[in-house]
Amino acid sequence: MVYNSVMYQIVFPFLFLVVLSFISKLFSEELQLVNIGMIHLIPILFAAMQLGRRDTFIISIASVLSFNFFFIPPTFTFTVHDFRYIFSFVIMITVGQIVSWLSEQAARAKALESSERLEEILLGSLSHELRTPLAAIMGASSGLLTEELDLNSEQKKELYHTIDNGAHRMRRLIDNLLDSARLQSGMLKLKIQECDICELLGSSLSKTEHTFPATLTINEEIPSVQGDAVLIEQALYNLLENAFKYGDAVNILVDHDPDGVFIRICNTGSIPHAYEASTAWRAFSRLSNIRGEEGIGLGLYVAYRIAEMHGGSIKTMSDGVEFCVTMRLPARSDR
């Protein structure tokens, strides 16, 4: 896929050059030679903005040769009698290299700006989100270690629960960060096997901390999917955790169609606005319904990338009453 995309990017300027040369030849009597030279600069500039300097140099040579062969007298030869034309050729190639270099510098500046912005968001989120469970753990452990406090068994149990909950919150946060980093770097590799979606959903539900039951609807004869069971379960867990965190009622539908199996998880309660719901899966998304809960906006993103790795998709939407996430996986995958 990547190889074909790169080949297309390289071939397109050549085709563009052929078309421009043909048109210039048709109207060569109406066009002045300087205008034809400017026309042949267009594919060079296009390549300079889209490709690297090496490919831009190749396109530049091809454009110069075409300009020389078809338009510089004596035409249909590569002979050049006037030194001024050679100077023009050098200028065309040099302009391509300069524009290509400037494009590379602009891309690096943009990437650096995005990286700095991402680092700022990440550090800001971590400083807040890790501090909250860490403060709870330190407070509870200090209470248990203080000899002046005469705690009964129920009070000690409550403090132990506080420590346990805080540790789980920190672990979920760190797991999502690590999963996100592995997905971005391509380190995660799929271990393909036959997966029972209903079984993985049940396992995810059992691991999710929630204070109210979900309404579960599973249509008959749900086909299995080919995928990585551990990653699919992680994606389902993230979707369920998000629904229980912000919802006061959760409805789950498991169904299938000719395109594969889909799991739709909807919750009422605190839901984002409809205009922002469609992009809720993006990394570090902090929507209008956060209500101060822990998290840095990576749970849905990790699930989205896992579905994408399996040739599936995740779509998010809100109608003002419910926020729904639909995870779709192909019934069969060649991956």
Image (tube, rainbow, N blue to C red):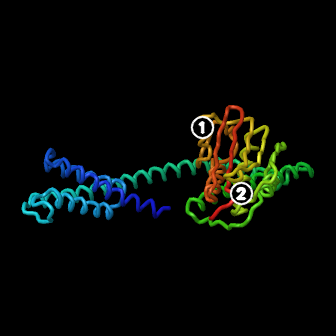
Q: Secondary structure at mark 2?
A: helix
Residue found at the very far right of the displayed protein: 153
For residue 216, side relative to residue 101 (left or right): right
Q: Is residue 112 left or right of residue 67?
A: right
- Residue neighbourhood size for the residue with mark 1, other residues' Cα within 10 Å, grouped as few (<14), some (14–19), many (≥20): some
Circles 1 and 2: CB distance less than 8 Å?
no
**Nearer the observer, 149 or 247:** 247
Secondary structure under the numbered disc 1 in the rendered image? helix
Image location (x, y in percent) of residue 263: 73, 49
Q: For the residues marked 1 and 2, what is the alpha-carbon distance in whole angstroms?
A: 24 Å
- Residue lying at 16% horizontally and 49% vertically, measured from the top left: 28
* Residue type (three-letter) at the residue carrying disc 2: Gln
Q: Which residue is painted at 47% across and 50% down in the image? A: 114
Amino acid, disc 1: Glu
Whole-percent x, y for residue 224 in the image:
75, 59
| Residue nearest the observer in this picture, 200 or 17 | 17
Residue furthest front in the image: 26
| Residue 80 at x, y percent in the picture | 10, 63
Point out residue 309 in the picture as x, y percentages from the top left corner: 61, 59
At 63% across and 34% down in the image, what residue appears? 273
Question: Which label sits on residue 276?
Answer: 1
The answer to whether residue 198 is seen in the rendering is: yes
Asked if 129 appears above or below 291 in the picture, the reply is: below
Residue denoted by label 2? 234
